[in-house]
Image (spheres, coloured by chain):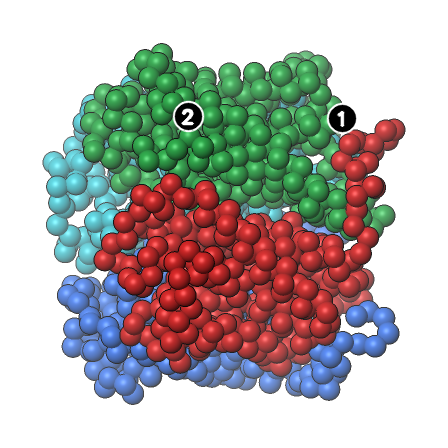
Chain colours: A cyan, B green, C blue, D red
């Protein structure tokens, strides 16, 4: 592999490598978000279909953490492993990506989320047919929709849903931006794992009101398929709470990033010169400089 | 980002960076402890409000670990990420911070804890209104207070509460001081994660008597709000056990640090010269040298 | 240890070290897979024998993760710690191992799996005699077989079993190949731990249909012993689903590896020259160059 | 701290540092094993006293992992953090410690285990008085003893107990010796954490027969106190199974270490010269060279 003729994968790489960085990153965002949903929605479905017997709430929280961590590991040095429109929105306001990149990435993320949902749907079709929702089903009117998307309880107002999405996403993006800040010296090799743990933590702390609406790609993709399968009630349910959480999440992502910058990021001591050069590689997160 | 025009965050940094190190560190302790409570109390509330269905004891223990780990990650290179008056007290007796710093940090920590509590209160207000405490509620007389603070069982004496707080905090601070000791060569990049695991471990081993009273900021902030909401019984309950655990915790923090020094810290072999220089950066923990 | 007389293990090493790399690697695959089964099947048995009381589904999922991680840690620098015929098949199609190595490793893996199963059987013989399968037993007709191998539910078709095995193994191998790709810069020292977490994640997301058939060595070894103990129904059950998942898993492993290469692997930016040399040691994964 | 007058801890260190390496290491083994029991037995007690409500089996398994990991972190560079007579026995047969060291360390470990048990006893005395053992108590005849030590079920023979202890300890020591082997290139900074995960894994796979008898110090210390409190039945119960597991564990530790050496350790490829020198520091594990 090091000397002489190259192995097949290296030869293919020379021929098929995508040179356009925007397209390459969009592909990474599409594949990464698709995997995130294929894994995360898969384990959520086991959670609901087994009536919390095989996958409890704890497993769902830890599982979503892994479902974020590993897709980020494999896209981190390509597109930065954003995989979340709210994070991309924050990076756009920070000047890390431009408007064109933002729009393309978000489309790729939502498309990936939809394709991942279709995959999960077919893998659990036998189980869905067999499943009888019981009294725990929150949205009784929308048959089987609980298997795809979480719904808020009736006694939770949309104002609470909005702030729940805002604070949850703000926490997520606050910690991601802080961990990416090279002055905080968090080893790059464990960034994706820590991002996953942050997701788990946020789901533990703010998972009760509206089902952790901290990633719009995780919501829109499945919701479109559910709408196609079970009708538009999935959009109008609970006074269009899904739009409320969507805006809450986008605003939360932007708020979290800037709250970090003003309260902590601007005040972290500068790195010693020697370290600053060593961590120049952390700029690889920024897609345009890849 | 490295050459040419700087991105917005870097330009803002040059203008708004706080030069006074004491104020800067106090801000970090305030924000860090606020986040710690916003996360930790949030998941504790899900634990109680869902009657241990969504968040079990295990999740609460693991969640508190993350609730400590991530706020420490983002404040570690500013104020050292103390976020706990008992740890600050130990660092003061070790000569790592002076009296002025100690007082300012503790005030910042308690203020952060209170603001975090207010945030949690509003995010779970809909759920609190809907909540019916059941027979498991320890402190039946204090309505809904269990959602904010844990209470000891009736059959646990205040002497046990005192030693529970002392031993729990001693364990926590013992391991934190040991991990910070550069002679033990624990990689800096995983310190905050290990601190979080120590919290989880302590909660597992000593969470039954008095609800893990190992961080006074986690107790005082919420208790003030609960007192304002539900009356002063929250202070007088169980013969003022909260003051007992408060003193136990502060004494435990100091004891744990010095117990480490006398039994192990003084006897760890010196680092080889080359390594000693490489780990000079670990001094960054000490706020005054930042 | 470094100077003067060598300790006993070092002297033995000089005398007994196996020089033939193929034999050495086959021994590592045999021992590693044996340990994987000794641990993983042991905890699965506790799961079933205690009727999910001592080991819940969550513990089984986390435990299988460790059961993969640690055997990989100890064989990683010998044979690459493949321990899974589907992964070996993928490495073969990638040109990392040749046909002879592939055949020898798979035989070693299955033999290790069988010997590990025998060990578990004897350690839990007292408990197996005492065990009364209850109504939860899926395959009622095959006495005690649930203790050794998972069975699909009656309402799950073999087509679903095939795609369940294919997608589950594809996810596993996709992430393993991606983590091994030196351009993704995942620190070598945590590779085995991450492989274990990928197993846990896959079990969470796709553990409901057919019991996570992502490693044929984990299936064939135990199935042979169960066939010897309880009769051939264990093979014919559910229209020979085990053959269906076997082919699904092998095809999934190959698909996962190549899907990674085409969607992400070919497009990851090249390493800077200095890093490329530092990570040359990652080639140690490739057995033939050891 | 680096320049000018030294902080108090550094000045104390110069005066009180123990120069005799054997005594120093014995103190570390005593303190480390004491902490291991203070934490591990504490969480086991919560497991039993809360009737598996606060600490489930899973928490006990994970908790024991941490209870090993952190005491090893703080003693690793002093005595190697052995904290287990079966591991010390293995290190003795490998020529890493001599007979005198072995005897002194084991005495220190058992003494630490006893002192830790006394601490746990007093911290949970209120709870022990309040506790009513229910029908789940295995050893009905020995009042409250289940809070301190696990007992095998009646239907498990002593032969099974012997092999359970042997295989469990062999797994533990096999992986510890393998991780310590510098040729396997496991980063030193995560060794203690991995040792803890190995304990969790072993408890998951072999925790059903005899309660994970893989560390005699964890058994003898508590058993002595229980004998003093509740009578000698704790020794004679189940035909003196505790002696059976004691010998099984010691033999298992030695077997695990040598099994590793013969099957894998002797065959791991040598490190490149440059790396070999960098990892010379891993020799610090060996107490006599500290």
Q: Is residue B77 visible?
A: yes
Q: Position of residue C73 (x, y in %)?
A: 57, 65
In the shown orientation, is residue A30 left or right of residue C16? left
Chain hosting mark 1: B
* Neighbourhood count class around disc 2 (C-alpha, 10 Å): few under 14, some 14–19, many 20 upward: many
Q: Secondary structure at mark 1?
A: helix
In the rendered image, the vertical position of residue C163 relative to residue B13, given as above or below: below
Residue at mark 1: B289
Q: Position of residue B7 (x, y in %)?
A: 64, 24
Q: Position of residue A253 (x, y in %)?
A: 45, 27
Q: Quadrant of residue D25?
A: bottom right
What residue is at 49 percent from the left and 42 percent from the top? B202
What residue is at 70 percent from the left and 24 percent from the top? B97
* Mark 2 vs mark 1, CA separation in Å: 38 Å
Chain hosting mark 2: B
Residue at mark 2: B241
In the shown orientation, is residue B123 left or right of residue D260? left
């Amino acid at each position: 592999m090091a000397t002489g003729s190259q192995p097949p994968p290296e030869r293919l790489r020379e021929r098929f490598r995508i040179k356009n960085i925007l397209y390459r990153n969009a592909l990474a965002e599409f594949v990464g978000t698709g995997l995130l949903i294929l894994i995360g929605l898969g384990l959520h479905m086991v959670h609901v279909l087994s009536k919390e017997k095989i996958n409890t709430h704890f497993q769902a929280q830890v599982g979503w953490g892994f479902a974020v961590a590993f897709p980020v590991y494999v896209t981190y040095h390509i597109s930065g492993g954003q995989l979340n429109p709210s994070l991309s929105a924050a990076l756009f306001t920070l000047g890390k990506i431009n408007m064109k990149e933002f729009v393309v990435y978000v489309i790729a993320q939502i498309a990936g989320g939809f394709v991942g949902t279709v995959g999960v749907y077919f893998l659990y079709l036998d189980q869905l047919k067999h499943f009888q929702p019981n009294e725990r089903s929150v949205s009784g009117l929308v048959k089987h929709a609980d298997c795809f998307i979480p719904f808020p309880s009736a006694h939770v107002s949309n104002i609470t849903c909005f702030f729940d999405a805002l604070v949850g996403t703000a926490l997520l993006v606050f910690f991601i931006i802080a961990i990416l800040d090279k002055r905080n010296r968090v080893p790059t090799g464990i960034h994706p794992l820590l991002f996953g743990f942050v997701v788990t933590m946020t789901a533990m702390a703010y998972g009760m009101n509206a089902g952790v609406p901290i990633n719009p790609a995780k919501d829109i993709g499945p919701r479109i398929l559910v709408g196609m399968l079970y009708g538009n009630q999935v959009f109008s349910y609970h006074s269009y709470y899904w739009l409320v959480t969507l805006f809450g999440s986008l605003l939360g992502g932007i708020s979290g990033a800037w709250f970090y910058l003003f309260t902590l990021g601007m005040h972290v001591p500068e790195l010693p010169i020697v370290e600053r050069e060593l961590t120049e590689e952390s700029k690889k997160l920024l897609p345009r400089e890849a």
